[in-house]
Image (cartoon, rainbow, N blue to C red):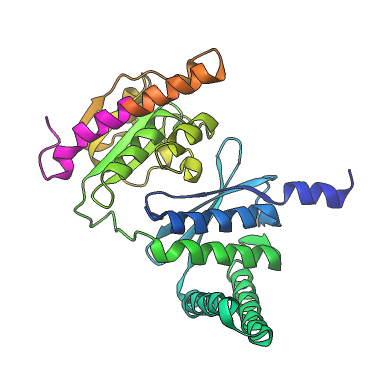
Amino acid sequence: MGTEQVAASTNRLTTVTLDPNTITSINPDEVHEWRIAVYDLLEDNSFRPARVKAEGPYALHMSIVGNYILLDVRNPETFQPIAAHYLSLTPFRRLIRDYFRIREAYYEAIKSAQPFQIETVDMARRGMHNEAAELLRTRLTNKLIIDLNTARRLFTLICAVQPYASRIDEATSQLPTVLFVCSMNSVRSPIAAALARQAFPGRIITRSVGVNGGKADAFVHQVMEEVGIDMSVHTPHILDELVANHFDLVITLSDDAPDAVRRKGLEAGTIEQWRVEDPSLVEGSRDLVLDAYRALRDSLRRRVRERLEPLVSGGSQNL
């Protein structure tokens, strides 16, 4: 394989995930738009972080913090952090507004306009996209190295997610906060956190972490998709990556989690341990394994609803 072929296979994104705590929507049309933008970006891109020695391919985890998009570059297999950059949305405000204005004009033109009118709108759309892509590349100088095509597709993804972002300031929010902790943040804790967000949308802040780093789990994706939750947005995180240090309730879901939480020194109103089976340890046919994942999902769904309802309703976390 030649040098150019090696570069093409390593200097690229193979995974893009979105932070479910800051990029939230229960509207299937909006979620579909995110998925299309992610698919287009992954289909054809040239991407690598500047000034780091880590080799690709790479994973990109996106979240929105205040007025910034956080571009968190990670190893796609282990999800170990490689580089993280904050991108201010302020310079892009006009272009984001233009994106939606021109997009609507283009859709309307397709319905009833003459070909020359459609071409006029399409030229404006391409011009806006090129301007945004050049600005994006400039703002990421010495941070991320991307070509124009990748910048165009990344800008489209930014436009798709930012209008629907939940900009809750966790430092000042009065919403109850819950942390789920398991061994690798691949199965039990992310399922519990996702079910909590689904059960109490906009009424609770939930996070999940692992004692050690894990990998995304395809069985989790399948069984959560069955109940309308897109787990492709999940990137495994570890306790040491937590920025917040105080939670109203910390729930541990694995045998190694309680000691790790104590060593971390988290401030918590209550710390509980839930003993739940790890379905990834089940051996047998695919159907048998999937049944174990579904059993975990359904039991956690009931338990999460029952345990968090008093907390969300303004009661005490101490039951």
Residue 145 located left or right of residue 108: right
Image x and y of residue 178, in percent: 27, 40
Q: Residue at x 23, y 57 (%)?
A: 172
Residue 251 located left or right of residue 106: left
Query: What is the count of numbered marks?
Result: 0
Quick one: quadrant of the C terminus? top left
Main secondary structure type of the part rendered in magenta: helix
Task: Work out whether 248 lies above or below 259.
Answer: below
Quick one: quadrant of the N terminus? top right
Residue lying farthest top? Answer: 284
Residue 56 located left or right of residue 59: right
Task: Work out whether 178 lies above or below 153.
Answer: above
Image x and y of residue 148, in percent: 70, 68
Magenta span has 12?
no
Magenta span has 316?
yes
Image x and y of residue 93, in percent: 46, 76
Q: What range of the chain is rendered magenta? A: 299-319
Residue 187, image quadrant: top left
Image x and y of residue 269, in percent: 17, 37
Residue 46 located left or right of residue 26: right
Which one is nearer the viewer's eye here, 199 or 142?
Answer: 199
Using the rendered image of the protein, determine whether residue 141 is visible from the camera's viewpoint.
no
